[in-house]
Amino acid sequence: MAGSRPRRAADASPTRAATRGTWQHLRQLLVDGVLWTLGGLGLLSMLAAVAAHLFGFSIVLFSTGSMSPTIPAGSAALVRLLPASEFKVGDVTTVERQGALPITHRITSIKPFEGSPAARVVTMRGDANDVEDPQPYLIHDARLVIASVPGVATTISGFRDPRLMGLLSLVAGGLVTWAFWPRQSRKATLVAAAALVAGSQLLGAPDANAAETEEQIIGRHLVLTVVSDKEALGSMIPGLPVLWQVGVDTVGDEEGAVHIGLGLAPGTVDAGALTVDVQACSERWIADTCPGTVNHWVTATPLDQAFVPATHDNTRELGSTPAGTPVWILVRATLTGSAPDVNAIMKLAAWGAGEAVMAESDGGGRGGLANTGSDGTLETLALAGAAIGSGLVVARLAGGRRRDTDREVAQ
C-alpha cells in the first residue's frame, strides 16, 4: 500500500500537467485568434482609410428600394468619387444634395453646363420608379457605384452606434493590455496594437449627414440670409465642392440698386489651393440647382485671383440687383489638392439704400474654408501610428522586464 502511493502521485502529476497544458494551449489559441481577427480588421481599416483618401472610395447605404431590383433596400455599395466629365448615360450615381441626404439613381441623360466646362447637367431615375426625378442635377463630380451587396446596410450602420464603438474600443484596449504583459509574445503585442486601429477607425468615422444652418444678418434696410454647412466649410475634402449661399434682399420701400461684392477676409492663408465658382440666381438655390434665372459671375478661378482687384471695402463688385428684388448668391469652393495650411475666409458685402452689411464664411468658428484631413482619415492614421508605436515601446519594455526576471531566476 505504501509503495503504491508514490505511483498514483507520479501517475496523476503528468495527467494534471497534460490537462493544464491543453487548457493553456486552447487559451493561447483563443487569444491569438481574437488578436489576429482584430488585427486584420485594423489592417482593413487602414487600407480603407488610405483608399478613401487617395482614390476617393467610400461606402453608401441604401434605406429605400428606389433602385430595386438592381440595388434593393438594405444594401451597401462601394462608390468612387469621379469628375462629372467621366460619367455617361446608364451609370448608377450618388449625387450630393445640399441640406438633404445623397440620392443614388441611374443617369438617363447628361449634357454640358454652359459657363462651366467641368460641370454637367444630369437627369436621373431610380430603376423602381416610373418617372424621372423632379429636377435635374448640376454636378461637378459625383460618386460612381462600382458594386453593391444586399442585406448588410443594417449591420454596417449598427457599427456606428456610439455605445458599440465604445465597447469595441474597451475590448481592444483590454486585449492590448493583456498582450503587453511580459508573459505574452511580442507578436501578440504587435497584433493587439493593430487591433487598436480598428477601434480608432470606428471612433474616427464621422456622420456623413449634412448639417445645414441658416442665419440672417439684418440691417436697417438690407437683409442677408446665409445658408451653409459649417462642418463642411471647416473640413474640406480634396475634389469635393462645398457650397456657401447668401441671399440679398431689402426691407421697406427702398429704391435704387443694391451692389454685391466678394472678397477675402484678413487671416486668409494659401487661398490659391481653392477654386471657386460664383453664380447668382433669382430664386433660392436648391442644393446647387437654380430654379430661376442664373447669372455666372466667376467660373473655375483660383480663390486668390477670383476677387481682385478690390473695388469696395476690400471686395470686388460682381453684380447688383434692384431694391426689392432678392438675389441668391451661390459660392462653390473646391479644394484642388492636399494643402494642410489652407485657411480661407470669404466675405460678401452688400451696399445700397444708405447702408452696407457683410457676411463671412467663418466655417462655424473654425477659421473658414479649410482642409483638416479627409473625413478624419489623417487623424485616424496618426492615432493608429501612435498606437502601434506605443505597442512597440511597451513590447520592448516588457521584453526587457522578462529578460531581467529570467536572469534573476537563473541566479
Image (tube, rainbow, N blue to C red):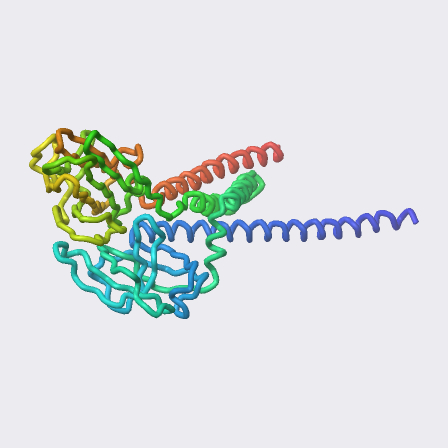
Residues 160 and 188: in front is: 160
**How many callouts does the rendering have?**
0
* 197 to 96, vertically: above or below: above
Relative to 338, is 152 on the left or the right?
right
Which residue is found at the position 65% from the left and 49% from the top?
Answer: 24
Residue 37 visible (yes or no): yes
| The quarter of the displayed image where residue 77 is located | bottom left
Instruction: Pinpoint residue 102: horizontal percent, then vertical percent.
Output: 34, 55
Which residue is found at the position 27% from the left and 57% from the top?
Answer: 142
Residue placed farthest to the right in the image?
A: 1
Relative to 303, is 28 on the left or the right?
right
Residue 189 visible (yes or no): no
Residues 136 and 390: in front is: 136
| The quarter of the displayed image where residue 253 is located | top left
* 266 to 45, vertically: above or below: above
Which residue is found at the position 29% from the left and 37% from the top?
Answer: 215
| Quarter of the image with the C terminus in it | top right
Instruction: Pinpoint residue 36: horizontal percent, then vertical percent.
Output: 51, 52
